[in-house]
Image (cartoon, rainbow, N blue to C red):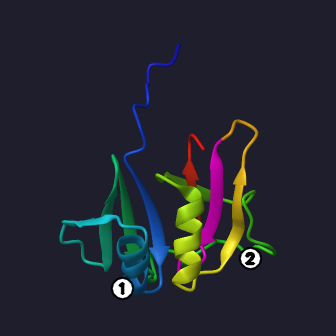
Amino acid sequence: MSAIKVRHIDHVTLIVKDVQASTDFYVGTLGMQAVERPAFNFGGAWFQAGATLIHLIEEHPESGPAGYPVEVLKKSSRNHHFAFEVDDARAAAATLKQLGHDLIDEPKTRPDGAIQMFVADPDGHVVELCTSQP
């Protein structure tokens, strides 16, 4: 038995080129709440997504590149991504389209009955929005 027991994901960190564009996406489009961020000596922002925090770090010489770390030939649901549960993934997809966002994958039903759809943030990070029960 392991001596370590993970309780939950505390935060996800993303490197971004434009903190304001990413804030507009995560807060303005996805409805997350901006939260206080410590006074680091580099740019960024923090958001609350349920029990999980999203930490943005503005791209700088020590951060590594924004977006995917390697060139991805085709963004899809089978690439690196992270997921947020929403009330209605189909409605979320319709809203994203109305706001001018191109979807990576239209809403679809997984074999377990959950609905999932995929979109990219301003830096190309693939974000899944899913609904556990249809």
Q: Amino acid at mark 1?
A: Gln
Image location of residue 100, percent across then percent down: 57, 86
Image location of residue 112, percent across then percent down: 70, 36
- The span shown in magenta is 114-126
| In this view, 1 is above or below 75 | above
The answer to whether residue 54 is left or right of residue 131 is: left
Can the viewer see residue 31? yes
In this figure, which residue is indicated by the disc labeled 2? 71
Specify the label residue 78 is tagged with: none
Image location of residue 16, percent across then percent down: 47, 78
In this view, the residue in front, 118 or 2, is 118
Please check the rendered image and state whether residue 80 is part of the magenta-colored stretch, yes or no.
Answer: no
Q: CA distance from mark 1 to mark 2?
A: 24 Å
The answer to whether residue 120 is left or right of residue 17 is: right
The answer to whether residue 44 is left or right of residue 72 is: left
Image location of residue 73, percent across then percent down: 81, 75
Q: Residue at x 34, y 64 (%)?
A: 32
| In this view, 129 is above or below 4 | below
The answer to whether residue 129 is left or right of residue 33 is: right
Q: Residue at x 59, y 79 (%)?
A: 97
Quadrant of the drawing holding the C terminus: top right
Q: Amino acid at mark 2?
A: Glu
In this figure, which residue is indicated by the disc labeled 1? 20
Q: Quadrant of residue 90?
A: bottom right
| In this view, 9 is above or below 70 | above
Q: Quadrant of residue 106?
A: bottom right
Please check the rendered image and state whether residue 124 is part of the magenta-colored stretch, yes or no.
Answer: yes
Q: For the residue carrying disc 1, how many other residues have a C-alpha within 10 Å: few (<14), some (14-19), or many (20+)?
A: few
Q: Residue at x 30, y 78 (%)?
A: 42
- Whichever of labels 1 and 2 marks the residue nearer the N terminus, that label is 1
Element assignment for label 2: loop
In this view, the residue in front, 129 or 13, is 129
